[in-house]
Image: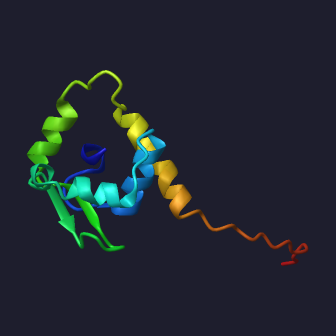
């Protein structure tokens, strides 16, 4: 999912948290923060505002993103199309589209 979202701190924490739950990996916010702070993983991530509501993160370099997106997937790993769909669904859940109010007007004369 990190490779699908691009390089650099682009992915909001809440979006990532919601999307991995949709993919079948339920994890608490605290557990996710612990994973992201792991010393082995931390070296591969670019994070801004860690631990805050404004936290965003992503892979630290384009070569890593290219390497991960160019590899064959392990059995059972979600495909890029599935990941993008899950991210889209999660965005819509977190920020639903505003309802459009249609106002009926009578015929107009020119």
> Which colouring convention does the figure follow?
rainbow
Q: Nearer the viewer, residue 83 or 99?
A: 83
| 74 up-or-down from 83: above or below | above
Look at 19% across and 64% down and name the residue there.
47
* Residue at x 19%, y 59% (from the top left corner): 37
- Residue extending farthest to the right is 106
Query: In the rendered image, which quarter contains the C terminus?
Result: bottom right
Q: Residue at x 17, y 44 (%)?
A: 65
In the image, taking residue 29 as reference, residue 63 lies left or right, namely left
Indicate the quadrant containing the N terminus: top left, top right, bottom left or bottom right: top left
Query: Does 73 appear above or below 9?
Result: above
Residue at point 41%, 41% (across, down): 25
Q: Position of residue 78 (x, y in %)?
A: 37, 32
The part of the image, by quadrant, that contains residue 93 is: bottom right
| Residue 3 in which image quadrant | top left
Q: Is residue 5 above or below residue 24?
A: below
Question: Is 106 left, or right, of 103 in this rendering?
Answer: right
Residue 26 lies, in percent from the top left, at 43, 46
- The number of callouts visible is 0
Please, which residue is most extreme toward the top here?
A: 75
């Amino acid at each position: 999912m990190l490779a699908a979202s691009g390089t650099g701190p682009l992915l909001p924490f809440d979006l990532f948290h919601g999307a991995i739950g949709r993919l079948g990996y339920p994890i608490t916010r605290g557990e996710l923060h612990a994973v992201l702070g792991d010393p082995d993983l931390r070296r591969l991530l670019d994070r801004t505002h860690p631990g805050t509501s404004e936290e965003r993160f992503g892979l630290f370099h384009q070569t890593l993103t290219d390497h991960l997106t160019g590899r064959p997937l392990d059995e059972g790993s979600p495909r890029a199309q599935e990941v993008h769909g899950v991210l889209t669904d999660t965005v819509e859940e977190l920020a639903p589209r505003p309802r459009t109010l249609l106002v009926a007007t009578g015929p107009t004369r020119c």
